Image (cartoon, rainbow, N blue to C red):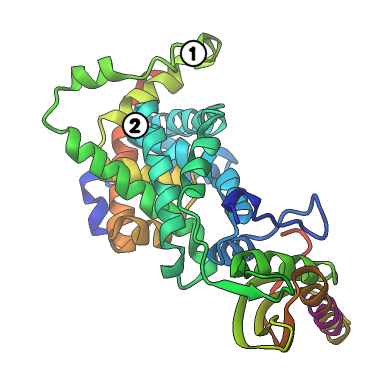
Amino acid sequence: MAVNQDYELPCGRELETVWARLDEVGTGHADEHELTCPHCGTARASLLALREATQELVAEPDPAPPDLVGRIMSAVRAEVRRGQMLDLGTPEAGGVEVSEQAVAVVLRYAADAAGDVRARRVRVRTVGVDDGGASRVEVELTLAVRLGNAHGGDSLARVRELVTAAAAARVGLLMEKLDLLVEDVYEDAE
Amino acid sequence: MEGGAVTTTNAEPGTPLDDATLVGRARDGDVRAYEQLVLRYQGPMFRLAVKMLHHRGDAEDVVQEVFLGAWRKLEQLSDDQAFVGWLYRSTTNRCLNVIRARRPQADVDLDLAESPRRDARPEHAAQVSSQLAALNEALRDLTPQQRACWLLREVHGRSYDEIGQVVGANPTAVRGRIARARAQLAEVMKPWR
């Protein structure tokens, strides 16, 4: 290959070829040239030393400072995106609002509880207000389903049931419509 | 509602969620989901930054900026599966920028600027073999682009295509940079063969 021409050994072999065949030679499958060529032998020894040092480098314990995650998350929390606020119905004077994000968390948790599914994105849209002042909402929930889930229909029905119940009981929103979008599958190991 | 109070409880605690699910939730503003991603990937990004910059303090700054920047730009990420590649790209580019900004300084200044944290871990220094020390030293003599390509390939196991996307070069150019880096490093390793 043209890019490797700078590293042609005096015997005509390229260093990359020697690198690519390290294991081959190491396991006794050297060709005639490799068995006798001193240039290849010298290059091979250097590359083996490099490979050994690289393995040490990979295994080297060099963890990030323990407080780094805390500092990153402090900065992230300072920039929390609150998104839209939803009105909650209340018989008392004055309004009560809840962020869409907070509603999304409740709905995701409810969906996760159905089993064999993982909730991803939640979109909540207010479409009106009922007589009691509670928001009527339409929700779109994106899901990943466990690979091999033989009862996908049952899982989705359970998601629908749990999410609708949670919206009413835990947040006080009236669910007008719930769209469930299955966008992905996941394996148990993930 | 305070951001910190936005919590997500998994139905099955102990089962780590896949990246795409966490990214999807984080995009919705779920801070706890994002924290899981930070916990998962800050180690590899820090490791890459330290080897690129040879300076723990600068590496910490880079990693912090990368994750804050990713949080701000999650909306722009079209493919949730691409999050890790995005982190690698961002970390590499920020490191290259830091190196570019350093250029006017003499090398000796960089040595003096080495964070004292390294000295605070003498037990670690003692374990480092002379072979590994030589490799670490030799990495500093590569060009920043060669160093990035070599580290991404040999330490982080990224494919040529992925590295090409990270450094903005085609896979053939990446292969060439890695080959040159390998030849230079092998030369340095001669005394240990």
Circle 1 residue: B125
Amino acid under label 2? Asp
Q: Which residues are magenta?
A: A157-164
Residue at point 62%, 70% (across, down): A95
What chain letter is assigned to the residue under label 1?
B
Q: Nearer the viewer, residue A139 or B121?
A: A139
Name the residue carrying label 2: B58
**Magenta span: helix, strand or loop, mainly?**
helix
B43 or A73: nearer the viewer: A73
Three-letter amino acid code at disc 1? Ala
Image height check: is A181 above or below B25? below
Q: Nearer the viewer, mark 1 or mark 2?
A: 2
Closer to the camera in the image, B27 or A29: B27
What's the residue at 84%, 77% (across, down)?
A: A165
Residue drawn 49% across and 36% down?
Answer: A71
Q: Quadrant of the N terminus of chain B?
A: bottom right
Position of B162 relative to A26 (above/below): below
A133 is higher (above) or lower (below) than A90 = below
* Subunit of label 2: B
Q: Position of residue A43 (x, y in %)?
A: 36, 34
